[in-house]
């Protein structure tokens, strides 16, 4: 039975940006079985629902979200395959094919990347240090193909998914997914858990890499303000941050939102920012970069809830294509 289903949830608590109104219905499943049940219940009452990991790539509307949200943050199991009963029931069909079971790591979708990396270091298995500093869940990292983790792991990762349409549970190799820059087709379904086959690796070396990367990120990124990381995707062979910087966006402010002086592709919440403030800044950034450099930026962050439709249409438009036709 699902015990944690809440209404009137403050969305700013579910997003690293600390922005958002309230949500009418939010589920917090605690394991794979509850996730499947939540999906069934949400589907039965509404045609649309949205999956949330740790909300580090999401802009929730300050006007609120009317459809159900399923938040995986309570599903944090992460450990050896042999020790996890749930892993056995889900991944039994592939565990034999996966080989040496001592090298297998079972990860539920909501487990934070920090925890997965820590497990790798503790068990001398690697290497997922590429996810250092990506402040989301492992499910969110796979869905967003963060730091190309799906490319990196595609031959050594199995995904347990629940179909949005039928509620059916299926297990498949990640190699069967479609993936691209900041995209994996698992976004179209519900990722519940992952089985990873990892190679033995040097714990001290991984620890050093994590320390170095964390220091480098702390130096380069504005981690002292709430944000959702880069707001725009990098265009092919270009850097969105460099384009926004050259376009003079740094420090441009709307309400409580501001293009960071340290990294122009970060919009930070300096206090009390609304989703409209962020959208206005993004529209302004996209327009200026287009007018000055003829490059059409595309949002990396996802918009969840009620927004000005015209503004979102503009943000998602490919101006280069429109221009050429
Ligand atoms: C300070 C900062 C730095 C960042 N640096 C990086 C970086 O270096 N590289 C990078 O790639 N990203 C970076 N990000 C962005 C973000 O952390 C990643 O996109 C992250 O992988 C999102 O994970 P999440 O759990 O927060 O997902 P959410 O933001 O909650 O969701 C993101 C998307 O994944 C989907 N999703 C989440 N869980 C599931 C699931 N179980 N099944 C199906 N779909 C799911 C959601 O529906 C949504 O479409 C950064 C963000 C911040 C705030």
Image: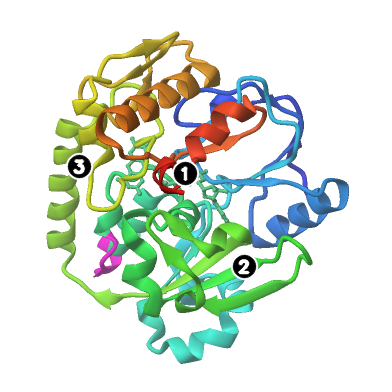
Q: Which numbered disc flags the more N-terminal residue, 2 or 1?
A: 2
Q: Which residue is drawn at 52% across and 22% down?
A: 19
In front of the other: label 3 or label 2? Answer: 2
Q: Measure the C-alpha gap from mark 3 to mark 2.
A: 32 Å
Q: Classify mark 2: residues with Cα within 10 Å, few (<14), some (14-19) or many (20+).
A: many
Q: What stretch is highlighted in magenta?
A: 121-128
Choose between 161 and 313: the one closer to the eye.
313
Pinpoint residue 74: horizontal percent, then vertical percent: 58, 46
Q: Is mark 1 within 8 Å of ligand 1?
A: no
Q: What colouring method underlies this structural image? A: rainbow
Q: Measure the C-alpha gap from mark 2 to mark 1.
A: 36 Å
- Left or right of 169 in this view: 243: left
- Name the residue that disc number 2 marks: 161
- Left or right of 7 in this view: 215: left
- Name the residue that disc number 1 marks: 322
In front of the other: label 2 or label 1? Answer: 1
Pinpoint residue 188: horizontal percent, then vertical percent: 61, 59
Q: Is mark 3 on a helix, strand or loop?
A: helix
Q: What element carries label 1?
A: helix
Q: Which residue is drawn at 36% across and 11% down?
A: 253
Give residue 207's quadrant in the image: bottom left
- Name the residue that disc number 3 marks: 214
Q: Residue at x 31, y 55 (%)?
A: 147
Look at the image and say whether residue 126 sits in the magenta stretch: yes
Kindly tell me whether residue 183 is visible in this rendering: yes
- Left or right of 284 in this view: 166: right
Q: Is mark 2 within 8 Å of ligand 1?
A: yes
Q: Which residue is drawn at 35% across and 16% down?
A: 258
């Amino acid at each position: 039975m699902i015990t944690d289903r809440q209404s009137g949830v403050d969305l700013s608590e579910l997003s690293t940006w600390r922005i958002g109104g309230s949500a009418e219905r939010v589920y917090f499943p605690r394991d794979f079985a509850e996730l499947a049940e939540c999906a069934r219940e949400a589907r039965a009452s509404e045609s649309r629902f949205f999956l949330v990991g740790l909300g580090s790539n999401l802009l929730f509307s300050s006007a609120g979200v009317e459809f159900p949200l399923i938040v995986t943050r309570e599903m944090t199991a992460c450990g050896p395959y042999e020790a996890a009963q749930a892993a056995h029931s889900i991944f039994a069909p592939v565990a034999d094919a996966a080989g040496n079971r001592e090298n297998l790591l079972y990860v539920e979708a909501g487990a934070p990347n920090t925890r997965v990396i820590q497990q790798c270091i503790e068990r001398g298995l690697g290497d997922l240090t590429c996810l250092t500093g990506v402040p989301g869940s492992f499910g969110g990292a796979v869905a967003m193909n963060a730091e190309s983790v799906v490319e990196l792991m595609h031959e050594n990762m199995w995904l347990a998914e629940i179909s949005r349409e039928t509620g059916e549970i299926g297990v498949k190799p990640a190699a069967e997914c479609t993936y691209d820059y900041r995209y994996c087709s698992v976004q179209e379904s519900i990722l519940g858990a992952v089985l990873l086959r990892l190679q033995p690796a040097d714990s001290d070396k991984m620890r050093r890499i994590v320390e170095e990367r964390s220091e480098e990120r702390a130096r380069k990124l504005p981690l002292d303000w709430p944000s959702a990381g880069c707001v725009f995707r990098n265009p092919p062979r270009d850097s969105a941050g460099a384009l926004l910087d050259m376009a003079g966006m740094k420090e441009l402010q709307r309400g409580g939102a501001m293009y960071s002086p340290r990294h122009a592709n970060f919009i930070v919440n300096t206090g009390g920012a609304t989703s409209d403030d962020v959208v206005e800044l993004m529209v302004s950034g996209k327009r200026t970069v287009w007018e000055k450099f003829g490059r059409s930026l595309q949002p990396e962050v996802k918009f969840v809830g009620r927004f000005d439709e015209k503004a979102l249409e503009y943000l998602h438009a490919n101006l280069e294509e429109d221009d050429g036709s």
